[in-house]
Image (cartoon, rainbow, N blue to C red):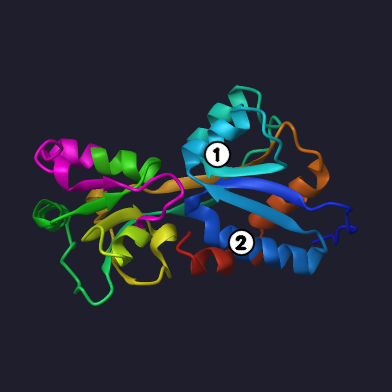
Amino acid sequence: MRKLEPMAREISGISSMATRNALAALAGLFAATEGQPVRVESVGGVTAADRIRAGEAFDFVVLARDALQKLEKEGHLVPGSLVDVAQSPMAVAVRSGAGCPDIADEASFRNLVEGAASIGYSTGPSGAHFQKLLAKWGLSERLADRLTVAPPGVPVAELIARGTVQIGVQQLSELAGAPGIDVVGELPADVQSITTFSAAVCARASSRPAAEAFLRFLIAPAASESKRQFGLL
């Protein structure tokens, strides 16, 4: 990869929480190898999209593909700059030492959810999919008082670790390596939902060439190991 000339300012980006850890590692690697500092702010996906729409200036954004496609249609992104960065399956986690419940198939996972004293999930693609599963199983109303939606920017793993919820359902990339929890495993194939996360250059980017270079780095083979380390495919 061509080495960039050092620039006077760091480039800045905003992302959802699902890619937070991987982006932090990759930003550090990019800075070390290319001499270009990168700052990434990770917040709830809805909040990130709203801030872009409100005109806040960022050089790049990393969100679920469908969210970026909407921003592109609305004119908030550089046309044609969108690239797919990684995919993340959904997973289940419990507090460390709580045991490993069976989630081998849809029936087992449903039984776990139905019998749990409390369940945490997030907003965004994983939360929307989990709500659809609850509706499919006819459990939305029955479990309403046992459901906790993590506030924007708060990982479900944090709710699990401090005992606020018994089990958590979220993107694997947000659960992998989090302290105080054990990842039980990915959702069974018949109820799994895999989210594609993409990146794009923002229309208000002040360092477009550097942002484009960082996006190329995110999809290069050298970035693959860091993404896998944090639960991204």
Q: Please provide percent x and percent y for residue 60.
A: 68, 43
Front residue of 51 and 87: 51
Q: In this view, does 137 lie above or below 180?
A: above
Q: Can you see residue 71?
A: yes
Depicted 169 relative to depicted 123: above or below? below
Q: Is residue 65 left or right of residue 182?
A: right
**With 130 as the anchor, is 175 left or right in this view?**
right
Q: Position of residue 229 (x, y in %)?
A: 50, 69
Q: Name the residue under label 2.
A: 24
Q: Magenta stretch containing residue 1, yes or no?
A: no
Residue at position x 52%, y 47% from top?
Answer: 43
* Magenta span of residues: 132-156
Residue 122 is labelled as none
Give the residue type that dot 2 points to. Ala
Q: How far apart are marks 1 and 2 (CA)?
A: 16 Å
Quadrant in which residue 93 is drawn:
bottom left
Mark 1 or mark 2: name the one nearer the start of the chain.
Answer: 2
Instruction: Give the number of callouts.
Output: 2
Q: Do the residues labelled 1 and 2 touch (CB within 8 Å)?
A: no
Residue, x 17% and y 57% (percent of image)? Answer: 105
Q: Residue at x 54, y 62 (%)?
A: 21
The residue that label 1 is drawn on is: 48
Q: From what the image shows, is residue 161 above or below residue 152?
A: below
**Along the line of sight, the residue nearer the viewer: 198 or 25:** 25
Count residues near mark 2 (Cα–Cα under 10 Å), then give few for <14, some for 14-19, many for 20+: some
SS at circle 2? helix
Q: What residue type is labelled 1?
A: Ala
**Image location of residue 35, percent across then percent down:** 83, 64
Residue drawn 38% across the image and 45% down it: 151
